[in-house]
Every structure is written in C-alpha cells, then in structure tokens.
Image (cartoon, rainbow, N blue to C red):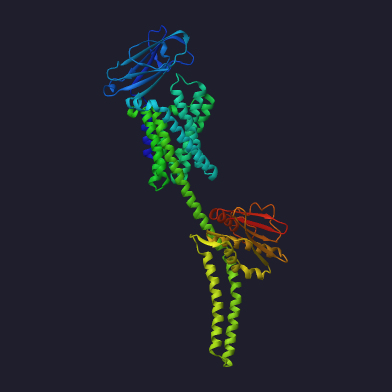
Amino acid sequence: MRILLLTILFLLSLDAKDLLIKNRFIKIDDDKIFNQLKDFDFEKQKLKKATIKITLDKELLKNKEFYLKIICDSKNIKNTNIKYKNFSDFIIIKVDKSSSKNIFLTFEYPKKQQLKFALIRYNSFEYKYLQKKENLLYGLAYGIIFCAFLYNFAIFLYTKQKSFLYYSLMQFCLIFILYYAVLLVEQSYINNTQQILTDFFETFCILMMILFSKEILNSKKNIKYIDKLLNILVYLSLIDLLIILMYGYSQLYNYIPRSVIVFTLVFAGFVCMIKGQKVAIFYFLGWLVVFICLTMMEHDTFYINNLYIIHIGLPLESVILSFALAYKLKLSSDEKRQKDNMLIQQSKLASMGEMLNNIAHQWRQPLTNLSFINMDLKMAIKSDDINTDYLNEIVKDSTKQINFMSETLDNFKGFYQPSRKKESFFISETIYSCINTIENSLLQEKINLDIQIIKDKRITAYKNELIQVLLNLITNSKDVIKQREISSAEIIIKLNIDEKNNCILEIIDNAGGIDKKIINKIFEPYFTTKNEGSGIGLYMSKVIIQSHFKGEITVQNNLKGAHFKIVI
C-alpha cells in the first residue's frame, strides 16, 4: 500500500507536456503583443486579422524531424515564415534542424469571423506510413472494441455476472471517447455540449473500470486495503459525474491524471497475481498496456501522436481483458460443474435411506427362500434323504438367490459411485434398472406400476444420472401417494420418440397433483414440502437433464395427478 501511494504522488508531481511545441501565441487585429493561444476564445471572438506564433524546441529538432498538420482556412493565409503543403482544409509543415525557432502564420479575412485553427503533430514515421491510412487504423480499433462490447454484453445477459456488464459498458464508452477524440482534435474549440459529453463519458468509463476491477479481482475479499482506495475512487467518480451535469465540466481530472487511476488498477492486479489469482495475469497485462499508453500521452514519451497511441493501445487492452473475462467464465463454469457434481452426490446420499429400504425389500424374498432351503436341508439330513442330485439342486437354488442379492448390491454401488464416463445405452434400460431397485417398495405400498415402452432410443450419456432422475420422480410420487392414502394408486412410465427424434419420457401418477401455489417452485434448490426432505432432489434432476443431457424437464397437473415430462 505504501508503494502504491508513493507512486501515485510521483505521478501527480509530473506535468503533462508536448516536448516539441513549447508554446503557442496569438496576436489579433491591431494588437502589438502576443497573448497565450489557450486564453483565446475561439467560440465567441471574431476577427479580421490574426497572427499565430508557434514556438518549437530547437534542441529536440537537432536529431529529429516532425510534421505539423494545421487545420485552417489555407486560402486566408497571407504571410508565413516557413514552407508548407496546401491541402485546402489544412496545411502540412515539415520542421527539422533547419527550421526557425518560431513559426508565424498570419490570417486575413474580408470581414470579421471566427478563427479556424487546430494543430496535430506527427513524427517522421507516422507521417510517411500511418497518416494516409489512419482511417483504416481507426476503423479496426472501433471494430475490435465494438466486438468486445457485444461479446461481453451477450455473456452478461446469459450469466448475469456484473463484471461482464461493467466491462461491456466500459467498452461502449471507449467507442464514444475514441470517436470524439478524432472529431475534437481537428476543431478550434470544444463547445459546452461537447465538453459535457466528453467529460461525462470519460468519468463514467473510469467508474466502470473501477467497478469491473473490484468485481473480477474480488477485491473486497482478496485485497482489502486496496479495495478501500477503489471505493474512494468510486465515490469521487460519482461526485464528478454530478459536477459535470451541474456545471458542465469535470473537476476530478483537473487534479488527478488518468494514469494515476489506471496505475491503481495495475497495482491491484499485480498484488492479486502475486497471491496466485490466475485471472489477474490477463487483468494486469491489460491495464499495464493502458497505463503505458496514458503515460506516453501525458508526458510525450517517444513523441508519438496521441490519437495513434489510444487507437492501438485501447483495442489491445480490449482483447487482453476479454481473455481475462473468458478465463474467469471458464473458472466459473468449472466451479459450477463441480458444485453440480457435489449436489448430485449430495442428492444421492440424501436418498440413501430410501435406497436402503428398497434393498431391504429386494433382499427379503431371497432371504426367505434361503431360509426355506436351509430348513429343507436340515430336514433332509434328519431323514437321511441326501443324494448328489438333491445337493446340486440345493446349491443351484442357493446360488440363484445369492446372485440376485449380489446384483442388487452392484446396482446400489453403481448408483452411488461418481461416474464421469459416458456410456451407450437404451433409455428403456434405465427404466428397468430403476424399477429393479424400487419395485418391491412400490408393491408394499400397493402401487400399480404401468410401463409403456412405445419407441426406444440408444443414447450416449451418463446412465446412472438418468436412473437417479427417474428414482427421484418415482420416489416423490410414491411418497405423495402414501401421504395422501390414495386408493387404487398408479404410476405410469411412458417412453416414446417424437417426430424430431427427441426421446419423450413421462412419469404420471394419480396422487392429486401439485398445489398451484408451489408448482413453479418445485425445481428450485432446497425447496421441499416434506418435513425431513433436503429439497435438492428435483433441483438436481433439472440440473442433470439440462446440463448433462441438454434436455428439458417440465411438470404440469392432469386430471388425476402430476405429470412430469423429460425431453432428451
């Protein structure tokens, strides 16, 4: 934190400047002295004659050459001390070591009017290779940033994650800022409306930058001290927005360079990167690019045209930070997948009691049969009526019962074992596997089971998970039937294939249906009407069908009861 504050103070102590042009002056009409051009009111003041004096840094020109693009009424130039190329709407002046320290341009008009004058500087490389193709550069920059805006806003609409909203709004502001930068740099002055719009969008953009940073870095949890500083910057930005709307111009950035704000974000990213936050790597690189660009602009580093700096740097930042958000989305997706898998297992464990009860029902018949076999064997021993054929038959019957019990255990073990390997199976197989587990429990409650396999289909998916969904739905129907003491109880399981080759799996009961007040809530996590229910069974059924089978599960009431429909 101390390093951050010291660096901010250092940046505040630096002055923004143009190293080539030391000063600009103007002398109007019959005035005998030159005044600062920055104090001249281009919007309101009209004149017939004006002389512009541009003072250059001759030391800089000893080893370098530059080109000055001056937007003006070239036909009204009456006198100058330097050669220039005339392009009607502007002139180009080459300055080098042979140029005079002061450039004079005298304009004369037939009648009083506003002075048109704006100056853009190019270094030698920019003028020869970029200036003629700058519209292509600007178009590419707008295209990249607009794509970043659309991409992240679309993801926000899908995920509802605030970091994508903040970043997309920031990109939208950047498009406006870049467009206005090109527009205003060729104007003699900025009117009040343009000033309000420019300052508002710049401050709002910075506000979105800070909010985006807080969200993606989770600064409240990971970097508490820096988060407090970010909160201060949020409040200052909000206050500055109000000042802009009330007074028409920004106050905040008259005292705080933009590079200071961005350096704070760079530092926050660096700290999170050191702490092992992987997404902070892209974040750090993205804001480092912006910080370097702003520093170059504010302190004229490398003598590069400011428009080219931002039209190269900001699209590069958009690409890098989009990678950061994409990586965060991947981490969120992985985290959600792990959470879903954990809930699936939790759902299975929550139904373990029911499954144990089903196994007890499944085992009761073979245990009874084994008991009869033992009694029969004991009687045969007493009566000395044992031979080889009798023993073979006894062993065969015993083995059959033991195999049935073992198969029941295998099914139980397979159901509770996490499976991440897809397998090919018919939908009907899951129905019969489910029924083998729960049939005796249904018979005990005198529930008639009607299985209708109209058309079947082979799919490749997670078989155990579909079995779990069926068990959840059938068990819920059984519990409601038992609770409401339904006579002539019935559960129908229907399987068919529709005209689009979708598998339609329906579970229908006659338990009276679901209360209309809660029918839209039953798939919500932890919603339950049972005294001892976990509330995750139907929620996980929906997650499994939607995420793992790319299908849909719906419910409605029919005349007799609930009607669940699964489309895969």
Most distant residue in the left direction: 62
When the figure is inspected, residue 310 is found, relative to residue 96, above or below; the finding is below
Residue 377 placed where, x, y %?
57, 87
- The residue under the point 33% across, 24% down is 19
Q: Quadrant of the C terminus?
A: bottom right
Tally the marks: 0
Is residue 494 in view from this perspective? Answer: yes
When the figure is inspected, residue 101 is found, relative to residue 354, above or below; the finding is above
Residue 551 placed where, x, y %?
57, 53
From the viewer's perspective, tell me whether residue 197 is left or right of residue 13. Answer: right
- The residue under the point 60% across, 72% down is 362
Residue 476 placed where, x, y %?
64, 61
Residue 534's image quarter? bottom right
Most distant residue in the front direction: 499
204 or 155: which is nearer to us? 155
564 or 389: which is nearer to us? 389
Residue 81's image quarter? top left
When the figure is inspected, residue 90 is found, relative to residue 479, above or below; the finding is above
Residue 188 placed where, x, y %?
44, 18
From the viewer's perspective, tell me whether residue 221 is left or right of residue 491. Answer: left
Q: Quadrant of the N terminus?
A: top left
Is residue 256 in view from this perspective? Answer: no
